[in-house]
Image: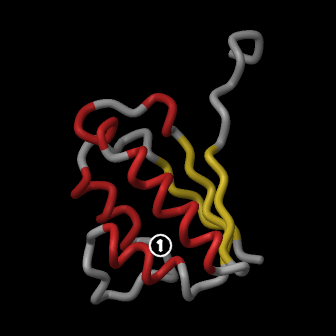
Amino acid sequence: MEILTLDLSAIHTKTELFDALTALPPFPSYFGKNFDALYDVLSTESFKLEIDGAYDCDGELINVIGTLRKVLEDAARTNPGFTFEFLERPSEEEE
């Protein structure tokens, strides 16, 4: 299974989030850049999406992380070929 990483460390807005997703291989050039379109892609493609930096996000992105998680969960439930993982924040001992 192909593993793709979405790095949220430099993303602060919903627009930047959808721009970053569009840059990933399974997203077509005509991707609608909204959560419905995200679900449509995730429910038909097979890959694992690793989301890094979600625990340190700021700005507008804080308000959309919950919606992003719900869309990812719904797509994974519908499509057995899609999985995702929010990468854990390193413990203070590891820093």
Residue at image point 31% right, 82% down = 31
- 82 versus 9 height, above or below: below
Residue at image point 51% right, 56% down = 6
The percent coordinates of residue 20 (x first, y second) are: 37, 62
Q: Residues within 10 Å of mark 1 (few under 14, many from 20)?
A: few
Residue at image point 55% right, 72% down = 75
Q: Is residue 91 left or right of residue 20?
A: right
The percent coordinates of residue 48 (x first, y second) are: 67, 68
Residue at image point 61% right, 78% down = 78
Kind of residue sitting beneath label 1: Leu
Q: Quadrant of the N terminus?
A: bottom right
Q: How many numbered marks does the figure carry?
A: 1
**Scheme of colours in the image:** secondary structure
The residue singled out by tag 1 in the image is: 24
- 55 versus 70 height, above or below: above
Asked where in the image residue 37 lies, by quadrant, the reply is bottom left
